[in-house]
Image: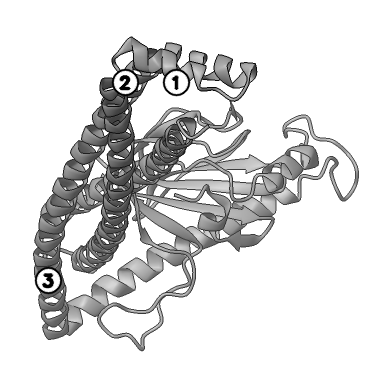
Amino acid sequence: MRQRLPILLLSLILAFLAGSGGLYAQDTKAQETKRARLQKEIAILDSQIKAITTKSANAINHLSLIRKKVDARKELVAESDREISGLTKAISAKEKDIKAMQARLDTLSDYYERLVRGAYKNRNPKVWYMYILASDNVGQAFRRYGYLRDLSKQMNIQAERIIAAKDTLEREREALAVLKKDAETLRSQRLADMGKLQAEQNDSQKLVNQLKRDKKKYQQDLSKKQKEVEALNREIQRIISQALNEKGGSKGSGKSSSTKEAPKPIDYTLAKKFEANKGKLPWPAEGAVVEHYGQRYDPVYPNLKLPFNNGISIALGQGSSIKAVFDGEVKQVVVMPGYNKCVLVQHGNFFSFYCKMGNVSVKKGDKVKTGQSLGTVDTIGGETQLHFQIWSGKTPQNPETWLRPR
């Protein structure tokens, strides 16, 4: 029993190390995924910023992109801080584990040395015989005989376990060295990101100052954009109202017209399925959200209200595919100033809208499936963004509460 106790403790330590290593690996994978997403978003934003000149009519959008890039960079730095903290804790835990393993290995080695010394001192067979004959009874004699018979075997087993423990200890030390190297690399990367962040914040402030100097032109650009937003909202409301009035039968005289399509009933079963997937819908495309849902304020004059944003804008790479977020029917494909082509998909009494598209691969009346491509995003004035909305009946929704968390 005394021989088995150190082995059991060592086994428990090794099992704990394997478990904690697995948890850390899972955590690291999630952090790496998030870091990769942020870096990809920053790269997309950077490419769009380079495509827009501050002297163009896109100065407002330029400022929006820079500020979003600053936000993404801040999040990246914060993620680095979290990873460094995690690595620091992992390094500390690993050092404690190695210390405990070394102490246990020392105990095993000491025990093994005592076994060897005992075997050496009693290597004379006469001593063994005397040890057996000096037993108090037959049972004790048999136990002593068994002990002496297995002594050599036990020493070999103990030696193998010590070798295995040393190998494991060496691997843990190598893993510790990797953790320390990763932490150092991450600290260097964080410093670089902090430098870029400061430069981006300076660019943002310079652009704000420039727009303030050219207030008249800025107000003209802003007024144009406001009119485009209002026109889009009116068109969406008109199409939704028209769709919701098609409830399965004509109103009025009750006479059907051979020249008009029969009104379609609203698929409330599909609507329930859509509603049941709130918070789980796939994103129409992967990119950084540069404009969020809700009330916005002017980036240059913070006290000035902008039109309420009924959706979100997602910065994308050129030619990115735009996908349907749920099963439904294409209700309309329209062209709007400032938004180019827009695809409106009906899901019962819910609607999803995909604007600023270039090529559209669907037409009115088409049935679409979740994840099906509707076409590709357009690049307008150097800006490649999808404008996306979700409506419940005649009420706009915050799309980010319906889409999967990232």
Element under disc 1:
helix
Q: Earlier in the sequence, mark 1 or mark 3?
A: 1
x and y percentages locating residue 332 in the rendered image: 55, 40
Residue 195 visible (yes or no): yes
**Could you tell me how far apart the alpha carbons at marks 1 and 2 are, in whole angstroms?**
10 Å
Relative to residue 293, is residue 140 depicted above or below? above
Q: Which residue is mark 3?
A: 198
Q: Cβ–Cβ below 8 Å for labels 1 and 2?
A: yes
Residue in view at x 36 percent, y 89 percent: 303
**Could you tell me how far apart the alpha carbons at marks 1 and 3 are, in whole angstroms?**
82 Å
Residue in view at x 45 percent, y 41 percent: 284
Q: Which residue is mark 1?
A: 131
x and y percentages locating residue 387 in the rendered image: 41, 52
Q: Nearer the viewer, mark 2 or mark 3?
A: 2
Q: Amino acid at mark 3?
A: Gln
Q: Which residue is mark 2?
A: 122
Q: Cβ–Cβ below 8 Å for labels 1 and 3?
A: no
Q: Amino acid at mark 1?
A: Tyr
